Image (cartoon, grey):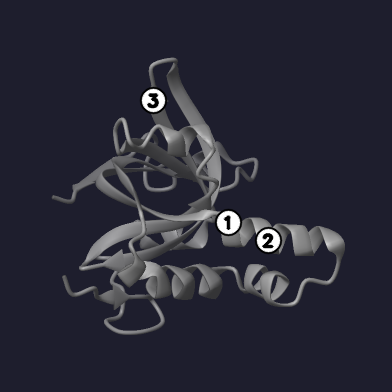
Amino acid sequence: MILMLLMPSAGRAMSNQDYPFWDLLSGESVLTLATADACGSWSAPVLYAASLLEAQPVLYFLSSANSRHIKNLPLNASAAGSIYASYKADWQAIQGIQMHGAVVEVDPQEQDLWQANYFARFPEVASMINSPASEKEQNIAKAFEKSGKYRFTPRFLRVTDNSDQFASKKEWNFD
C-alpha cells in the first residue's frame, strides 16, 4: 500500500470546503478514546497528532500496551472518540467532534510517518526525549521508547458547532 501524507503546511492545501472540521481536529491535542471489554466501556485521554492518510483523517497517538483501552484492541479494534475545544464561557461557541472507527498499532512501514507527524505537532516532546534535562524527563523518554504507536482511523465523524447554529451537527462517512 502506498501511504500519502497531506498536511495543512505541505502537499495539497487543506480546504475547509472538503474538510470543514480540519481546523478543530488539527488544532486540538487531546482525544478521549473509548473502547469496551467484558467488564464494560472504558475511556482514556491520549495526546494525538492529526493527519490525512489517503485523503482520510487519522489520529496518531502513543499509549502503553498494558493500558486497558489498548488491551481491548485484540478483542475488537472498534473505538469511539471525542475532541472538544476548550470552553471559553460562551455556550454559543461550543465545538466538538464525535467519531467512531478503528485503532491499530502502527506497522513498521508507517513508523516514520507516525513519528514525523507526532513530533511536528509536539516538538517539545521530541526535545524532551532527545535531550532529557532531568531524571524525570529521562524516565519519560524511556517510557516513550517502550510505548506503542497507534493510529485511530474514524469511519464516521460528527461535528457539533454552536457557533454555526445551536446544536448544529454535520456528519461525514469514510469507508
Q: Confirm or deny contact between disc 2 and disc 1 (CB under 8 A).
A: yes
Q: Mark number for residue 146?
A: 1
**What SS does tag 3 mark?**
strand
Q: Mark number for residue 36?
A: 3
State the image quarter where residue 11 is shown.
bottom left
Q: Is residue 21 above or below residue 128?
A: above
**Where's residue 170, x and y in %?**
26, 44
Q: Is residue 55 above or below residue 30?
A: below
Q: Is residue 7 above or below residue 104?
A: below
**What SS does tag 2 mark?**
helix
Q: Residue at x 50, y 42 (%)?
A: 94
Circle nearer the viewer, 2 or 3:
2
- The extreme bottom residue here reads 11
Marks 2/1: CA–CA distance: 7 Å
Residue type (three-letter) at the residue carrying disc 3 = Ala
**Where's residue 88, x and y in %?**
64, 45
Q: Nearer the viewer, residue 142 or 12?
A: 142
